[in-house]
Amino acid sequence: MSAAKTDVTMSDGDFSKLRAIVHKNTGITIGETRKSMLVSRLRSRLREVEEPDFAAYITRLSKDPDEMQELTNRVTTNETYFYRTPRVWDYFQDEFLPQFLDQGQNRALRVWSGAASTGEEAHTIGVLLEDIRLGHQKFDYSVLGTDVSSRVLKVATDGQYKGRSIARFREAKPNLFDKHMAGNDTDGFKANPQIRSRIKFKLHNLFDRLSGAGPFDVVFLRNVLIYFTDEDQEKILRQVHSQMRPDGVLFIGESETLTKLNSPFEPIAPIIYRPKAKANG
Ligand SMILES: C[S@@+](CC[C@H](N)C(=O)[O-])C[C@H]1O[C@@H](n2cnc3c(N)ncnc32)[C@H](O)[C@@H]1O
């Protein structure tokens, strides 16, 4: 088999097929104008697996589930960092958590980071909750981070962060950072073992039911809905709702809204929602 050339092109037919494959596997809708993005993300992969062109690569995908996962890893956009959107964390710390503690719940708080990417969101949650745990004898928590990309979950599980990934958190909350993250600038920082033991990561597609977890008190579904059609967002939101406690809270991304959707959530504040009560009968 000959190696793919660097200038390999994608026919419109192959672009359509790949868009359909990606949608079927991840729900992600690749816009009709994004062919060059897809080519640039996959060109090096064709060389690595020594497929001469996209038609051959599509045939390979139909026979090779590992390659399908690799395609998912390549087409997802995984931008994230600690303490993204401070407003979300202010609400979580100053409104939600005091209410939860006041209720004197005799169970651990369960949090789901539903598009966890490389794990910065789940670790931010862990640091904030660990700080509460150290001050409240009866409080405990668990955090589940899930994503459809196996590549990012490896980074999340390793949990070693540096540079841009931690910069904003370090600047905004220096005391919390120093108390709960250990390491140095060269090698990176890891959350302390007490935090790490309470965070798990798992491969999961948001369109599927999440088994063996939940119900969750808090769900972070941030900066992922933008990749889906309205109809697909509604499907995901119904799944998420079914995994939440009735008094739970849902956080979405800063450029997202549920207002135009038919969803089982109602707003508490911009980008912060609670499950609608189930209709009687
Ligand atoms: C931009 S990142 C968001 C990370 C983090 N939530 C944040 O706001 O910083 C979007 C993530 O959603 C994941 N994703 C895309 N489609 C998904 C699906 N169907 N199920 C689960 N995760 C998905 C991608 O792999 C990517 O890591």
Image (cartoon, helix red, strand yellow):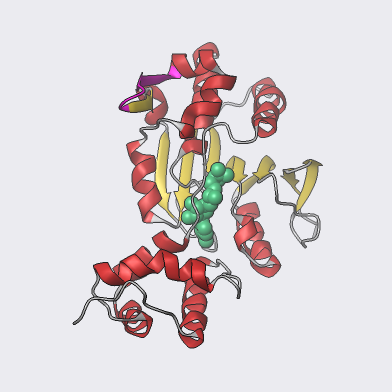
> In the orientation shown, which residue stands out farthest toward the bottom?
13
Position of the C terminus, as image quadrant, is: bottom right
Total number of numbered discs in the rendering: 0
Residue found 35% across the figure and 27% down from its top: 188
Image side of residue 213 versus residue 172, left or right: left
Residue found 27% across the figure and 78% down from its top: 51
**Residue 117 showing in the rendered view:** yes
Camera-side residue of 64 and 250: 64
Vertical order, 158 against 22 (above or below):
above
- Range shown magenta: 180-187
What x and y, as percent, mark residue 171? 55, 20
Magenta highlight on residue 160:
no
**Residue 139 showing in the rendered view:** no
Camera-side residue of 20 and 48: 48
Magenta highlight on residue 183:
yes
Residue found 25% across the figure and 71% down from its top: 49
What x and y, as percent, mark residue 275? 73, 48
Camera-side residue of 31 and 103: 31
Q: Quadrant of residue 274?
A: top right
